[in-house]
Image (cartoon, rainbow, N blue to C red):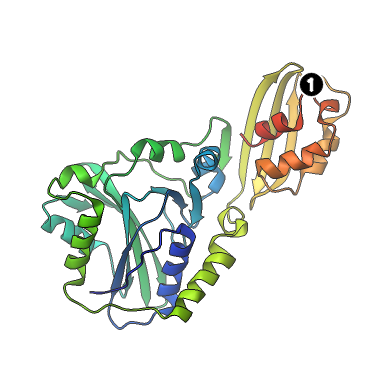
Amino acid sequence: MKYLINSSTDPHFNMSLDEYCLEQVSSDEPFFYLWRNRPAVIIGLNQNAYSEVNLDYLDRHGIILARRVTGGGAVYHDLQNMNYTIIGKQVGPQPMVEALRSLGVPAELTGRNDIFVEGRKISGYARRVRQDREIVHGTLMYDVDLETLSRALDTPNSKMNAKGIASVRSHVANLKEYLPGFSSLDELQAKLQELLSAGDAEIRLSEDQLDEVRKIAREKFSTWEWIYGHSHEADFSAKEKFACGTVEVHVRVDRGLISEIVFGGDFLGDLSTKILEKRLVGLRYEKDILAAKLREEDVSRYFEGIDSGQLARLIVR
């Protein structure tokens, strides 16, 4: 099978490359490429960013959030996870399964776009069809940090009701334990490259083509509008006890913007919270933006003894 070489570890560039190759790179035969991302969570096209990911954990640990052009659930990537992309007519993940089997791994396809080994998930994949061609891309976990994976995909404790496609959590495993003959993912990736290409030719993108991929990454895949604004409607609620009493907040977020917010509880304050609620509608559902807006208000007049940072953290818990 023909192939590209992609050495980028930028998640937004790599999402852009997938779309560009599907739509712009012509080839009479299927082609593939293997690639990796630095720590990132990649959500499916139809997923809600707020309900699928622990955004606070990502922010604190420098983990990038990206949205892909295919459906399916959220996945965590790091540099010990290898991804594969196959593009062509009526393509599927079978070549990767066969390559793993040739290395002695008893890999099996399941009904829900996953590859399992002995009942444990080692890979999730997704597809998208465009005219007469399609793309199939997926993960291949070699020695992924499973604790970070779990925490990144574990949403916070606030109550949430979100529309969109939810991820299905499976018991996951790393390929490293099934491939003791390989000393590193670099070695495994080189072997899979050899098996999948079988001596076929490399497809090279010109610098102009790569510039176009970078432009799409910059203007689409790395933007707030694509990553967060694409999210479906979601309802959130949280409450916390402060010195002034218990404060409850109920927020409706649509396309990343607050469309409705209501405060309640037994707290004390001088002003009606209805005034504040109206001023918060239309803002992005982001802690920093809300904190900046709340600093313009005298929050303690609504909630005695509470400052803007405390209230922002409660709203975006």
- For residue 163, say whether it is visible: no
| Residue 207 vs residue 200, the one in the foreground | 207
Secondary structure, mark 1, is loop
Residue flagged by tag 1: what amino acid is it?
Answer: Gly
Looking at the figure, which quarter contains the N terminus? Answer: bottom left
Q: Position of residue 140 (x, y in %)?
A: 29, 53
Horizontal side of 253 relative to 179 (left or right) equals: right
Which residue is painted at 57% across and 39% down in the image?
161
* Residue 53, percent from left and from top: 50, 42
Residue at image position (15%, 48%) is 179
Location of residue 246 (image quadrant): top right
Q: Position of residue 142 (x, y in %)?
A: 26, 48
Q: Which residue is mark 1?
A: 305
Q: Position of residue 244 (x, y in %)?
A: 77, 17
Q: Residues within 10 Å of mark 1 (few under 14, many from 20)?
A: some
Which residue: 66% across, 40% down? 287
Q: Is residue 281 left or right of residue 19?
A: right
In the image, what residue occupies the spot 53% across and 38% down?
60
Query: Image height check: is 164 above or below 245?
Result: below
Residue 5 seen in the figure: yes
Placement of 274 over or under 222, stated as above or below = above
Q: Nearer the viewer, residue 91 or 35?
A: 35
**Residue 163 against residue 268 in the figure, above or below:** below
Q: Quadrant of the C terminus?
A: top right
Observer-nearest residue: 104 or 201?
201
